[in-house]
């Protein structure tokens, strides 16, 4: 079934979908530079970008298979094209200068990768419209496009240099094509190779999209209702095409099978064991948190109503959508690692289901359908607008770094509590870099980035000796100190930066916080003013903006207290390391 335009109403529907794409693109691009130049404001971005740069430098084996490699290759291509552009305009004169430029300010390449995600996120809107159109026609396509354009979780993650949004795009496109396959049952259909290839690309972006395979198998059988042999033969061909596409997009899954098996086993254990905090029943968590806040409760309920209606139709054309949603939801909720982003592949499918149902129940009163669609989209739209507005606000980690560089003399020793995700991105001294390089090599790591940082030319930004305040130190790094005030003083710390936030990534040992309570703050920054209005966060994700109650958040990142320990440190001589 092709998307034919035969009436004035259908022409208008295309214009409405184009409008939804424009609104969706604006929501996904606004605030795209959030948190930069800090490299850790969104987990996983740095991992993917550094792997992409390694591939772009000539080593096609990413040596990393916690994710498949398609999106790493796409980012490598984007970074390579950006390098050629800089070379052509004379802003760099070679790869070494390009790398040094990235070391001191990674903002440009992060923006390149985030722009790629925003492009995939925007492209998912017409893919979702196509899916809804093939299920229920033009009105459903328009509604689905507008619902996905404003869907909060999809808008949020389209800003991130991660694999979730590209995988969601390929998965949605595969489903739209599979619905076309189901429409051609019993009519001597062409082979559904494009459907299988799209699903292979989805799996090559993120492994969990393999959970859409039952829909592919069903589509293959449903096209041959009178011949089990023909159906089995087509299913076998489709699975081979999907697998071949996956391996072509992630070739080192085969070429470096031992590393792939090791990393995949780690991901399987991680999914089963959890990610620190226990969040309870996975199915209920994804319903009550991931999807409730990712879509808004009214839209979630409409989506569930749509799925129930689709199930009641017993229409083989709609069954692949139902199979994909049910299979994915059952498996994704069966583990103990429950990131909210794991629900992303379901978002466009649920928007399409809601649109199909809404188009059906309001087929006699189209104005009512428009009003209901606007009401369903109002909550996610409001949440998306508030969120991207916050993304355009200067991150507290950036402000903390700017204040320290402006007020703390160069070369001072600064202790910073919390994880890497809450520490401002200050430049370390060369002696710190040399000491860290020795430590990581002793731990069996190459320390390539440290070598590049040491070899890079000097910058006008101040440098500091940095102490990382944390209780565990598995690599025996000399820059890591226990969470006790006496330990900081003994190591010559003149300043102590304490983060404050609801997420555990900003936790500080109670003894240290109690010891510091009596000290006056040199500088303080409040990133929220919520009081009794407690925002809902993705508890296990180091992302410092909430899923709800954005109104009481003033900026992304944690709050801070900066303490001057000079008067205390005068009682003990500083140590050299």
Image (cartoon, rainbow, N blue to C red):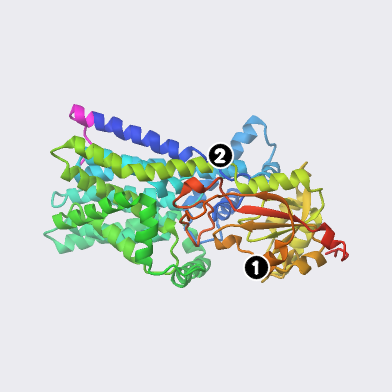
Q: Which mark is residue 538?
A: none
Percent x, y for residue 420? 63, 58
Percent x, y for residue 87? 64, 35
Percent x, y for residue 311? 18, 57
Observer able to see residue 275: yes
Q: In front here: 125 or 189?
A: 125
Start and end of the magenta stretch?
A: 1-11
Q: Quadrant of the C terminus?
A: bottom right
Q: Residue at x 55, y 45 (%)?
A: 554
Task: Assess disc 1: are there few (<14), some (14-19) or many (≥20) residues with their C-alpha within 10 Å of its C-alpha.
Answer: some
Q: Is residue 484 placed above or below 134 in the rendered structure?
A: below
Circle nearer the viewer, 1 or 2:
1
Task: Assess disc 2: are there few (<14), some (14-19) or many (≥20) residues with their C-alpha within 10 Å of its C-alpha.
Answer: some
- Residue extending furthest toward the top: 8
For marks 1 and 2, the one nearer the N-term is: 2
Q: Which mark is residue 81?
A: 2
Q: Residue at x 35, y 65 (%)?
A: 284
> Which residue is denoted by mark 1 in the rendering?
509
Observer able to see residue 198: no
Q: Quadrant of the N terminus?
A: top left
Q: Quadrant of residue 339?
A: bottom left
Q: How many marks?
A: 2
Q: Main secondary structure of the magenta part?
A: loop
Q: CA distance from mark 1 to mark 2?
A: 46 Å
SS at mark 2? helix
């Amino acid at each position: 079934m092709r998307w034919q335009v035969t009436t004035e109403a259908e022409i208008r529907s295309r214009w409405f979908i184009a409008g939804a794409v424009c609104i969706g693109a604006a929501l996904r691009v606004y605030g795209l530079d959030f948190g930069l130049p800090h490299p850790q404001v969104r987990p996983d971005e740095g991992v993917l970008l550094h792997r992409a740069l390694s591939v772009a430098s000539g080593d096609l084996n990413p040596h990393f298979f916690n994710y498949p490699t398609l999106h790493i290759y796409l980012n490598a291509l984007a970074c390579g094209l950006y390098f050629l552009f800089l070379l052509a305009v004379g802003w760099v004169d070679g790869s070494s200068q390009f790398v040094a430029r990235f070391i001191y300010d990674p903002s440009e390449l992060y923006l390149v990768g985030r722009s790629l995600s925003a492009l995939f996120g925007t492209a998912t809107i017409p893919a979702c419209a196509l899916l809804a159109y093939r299920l229920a026609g033009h009105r459903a396509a328009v509604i689905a496009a507008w619902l996905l354009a404003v869907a909060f979780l999809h808008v949020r993650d389209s800003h991130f240099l991660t694999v979730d949004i590209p995988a969601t795009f390929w998965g949605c496109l595969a489903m739209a094509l599979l619905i076309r396959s189901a429409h051609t049952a019993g009519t001597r259909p062409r082979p559904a190779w494009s459907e299988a290839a799209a699903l292979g690309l989805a799996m090559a972006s993120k492994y969990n999209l393999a959970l859409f395979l039952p829909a592919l198998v069903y589509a293959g059988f449903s096209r041959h209702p009178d011949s089990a042999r023909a159906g089995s033969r087509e299913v076998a061909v489709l699975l081979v095409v999907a697998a071949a596409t996956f391996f072509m997009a992630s070739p080192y899954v085969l070429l470096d099978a031992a590393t792939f098996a090791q990393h995949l086993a780690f991901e399987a254990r991680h999914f089963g064991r959890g990610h620190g905090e226990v969040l309870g029943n996975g199915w209920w968590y994804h319903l009550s948190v991931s999807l409730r806040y990712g879509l808004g409760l009214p839209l979630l309920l409409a989506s569930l109503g749509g799925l129930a209606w689709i199930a009641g139709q017993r229409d083989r054309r709609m069954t692949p959508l139902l199979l994909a949603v049910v299979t994915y939801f059952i498996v994704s909720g069966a583990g103990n690692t429950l990131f909210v982003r794991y629900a992303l592949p379901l978002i466009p499918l649920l928007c399409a289901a809601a649109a199909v149902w809404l188009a059906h129940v309001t087929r006699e009163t189209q104005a009512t359908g428009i009003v209901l669609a606007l009401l369903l989209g109002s909550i996610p739209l409001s949440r998306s607008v508030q969120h991207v507005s916050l993304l355009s606000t200067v991150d507290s980690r950036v402000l903390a770094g700017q204040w320290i560089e402006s007020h703390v003399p160069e070369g001072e020793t600064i202790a910073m509590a919390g994880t890497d995700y809450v520490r401002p991105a200050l430049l370390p001294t060369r002696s710190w870099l040399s000491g860290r390089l020795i430590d990581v090599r002793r731990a069996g790591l190459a320390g390539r980035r440290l070598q590049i940082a040491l070899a890079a030319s000097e910058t006008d930004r101040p440098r500091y000796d940095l102490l990382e305040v944390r209780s565990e130190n598995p690599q025996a790094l000399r820059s890591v100190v226990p969470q006790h005030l006496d330990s900081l003083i003994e190591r010559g710390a003149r300043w102590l930066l304490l983060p404050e936030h609801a997420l555990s990534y900003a936790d500080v040992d109670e003894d240290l916080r109690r010891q510091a309570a009596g000290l006056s703050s040199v500088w303080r920054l409040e990133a929220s003013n919520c009081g009794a209005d407690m925002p809902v966060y993705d508890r296990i994700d180091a992302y410092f903006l909430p899923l709800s109650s954005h109104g009481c958040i003033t900026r992304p990142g944690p709050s801070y207290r900066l303490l001057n320990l000079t008067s205390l440190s005068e009682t003990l001589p500083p140590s050299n390391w």
